[in-house]
Amino acid sequence: MSKRRPRDSQEAGWEFLASELRSRRTAAGLTQGELGERAFVSGSYIAHFETVGRKPSPELATQIDAALETGGFFERLCRKLLEESPYAAYFAKAAELEKLATKICDFESMTVPGLLQTAAYARAITIAGNPLAEDDYVEEKVASRIERARILDATPRLDYRPILHEAVLRVPVGGPATMAEQLDHIARLIRDRRGLVQILPFAAGPVPFIGRMLTLMEFEDAPPTVYTEGAYSGNLLDEPTTVRRVQRDYDLLRAVALSPEASLSLIESAAEEYRRCVTTT
C-alpha cells in the first residue's frame, strides 16, 4: 500500500515496529497464520502489520507480546508511537489510517469534517471546546488539522465522498465571515474535483447516523474500516458484518441526499447568505 506523505520520524517508528514483529516472529519459528491464531487475529492482519499496511492497537500489541513472549515490548512501543501523535489518543490510529486510505466516506451531522476545515473554522472549533486554552495549544491543533487535509492534494487522488447534514451549513461556527470562507473553501474543492460532497437536507427527516459522525475507509490491499466518534472517545470497527451494515446504511444516506450539483448550489447559497451578514454589520 503506497503512502501519501513523506516519511517522517513517526512513520520510521512504525516501520521499526513492523520490522521487529517480522524478526521476532521468524525467530520464534511461527508463520503469520500461526502468530495470528495465537493473538486471536487472522494471518492476513499480521501480514498487514509487518508491512505497515495497518498498525496494531495497544490491546492487540499486548496479545502479540503474549504470543511471542516479548515481555510487553510491542505494547510499550505501540503506546509510545500513539502518544507522539498530535491527535487525541482515541483518534490517533484513525488519523494514521486516513493517510493509507484510497477512499474515504465521511458523514457529519453538525460540523464540517476535519479534512474540509479551514484554519479559521478549525480554530473556532478548538476554542469552543477549550475556551481557556493557551494560544500555542490552539495553534498546534489547527496546524495538525490542516496537515491532515493535505491528503486531498495527494497523487494518486484520494476518492473522497463526504455527506454533510444541512445543519453543518447552518451552525454559525466562528461567525459569518468564518462560515462564508469555510463554505467557499468546500465549494472550491468540489469545483476542483477533489471531493464529491453531498448535502443531506432537513427535509430528508430521520436517517441512519443522525446526530453522529462516522468515517468509512477503504484500502488498496486491506479490509475496510469504520471509525465512529463520541464525546472524548472513538472506535475503529473492522468486523466484516459490522462494516457491511455501515456501508448499507451509508448507501441509504446517499440515496436521500441532494445530488452533487444541487449540493454545490446549496453550499454556495449559504456562503452568500453569510457574506451578506458580514457586509450589513
Image (cartoon, rainbow, N blue to C red):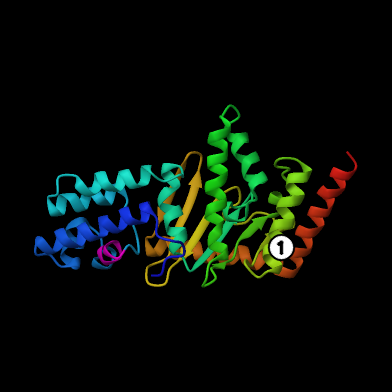
Answer with left or right where residue 124 lies relative to residue 42: right
Q: To which residue does mark 1 refer?
A: 188
**Camera-nearest residue between 246 and 147:** 147
Residue 100 seen in the figure: yes
Q: Residue at x 90, y 42 (%)?
A: 280
Q: Main secondary structure of the magenta part?
A: helix
Label 1 Cα neighbours within 10 Å, binned few <14 / some 14-19 / many ≥20: some
Q: Position of residue 78 (x, y in %)?
A: 29, 48
Q: Residue at x 30, y 65 (%)?
A: 51
Q: Is residue 258 magenta?
A: no
Q: Secondary structure at mark 1?
A: helix
Q: Position of residue 167 (x, y in %)?
A: 70, 49
Q: Which image quarter is the C terminus in?
A: top right
Quadrant assignment, res 277: top right
User: Where are the magenta residues, as a range?
Assistant: 46-51
Q: Position of residue 118 (x, y in %)?
A: 65, 50
Q: Residue at x 23, y 49 (%)?
A: 74
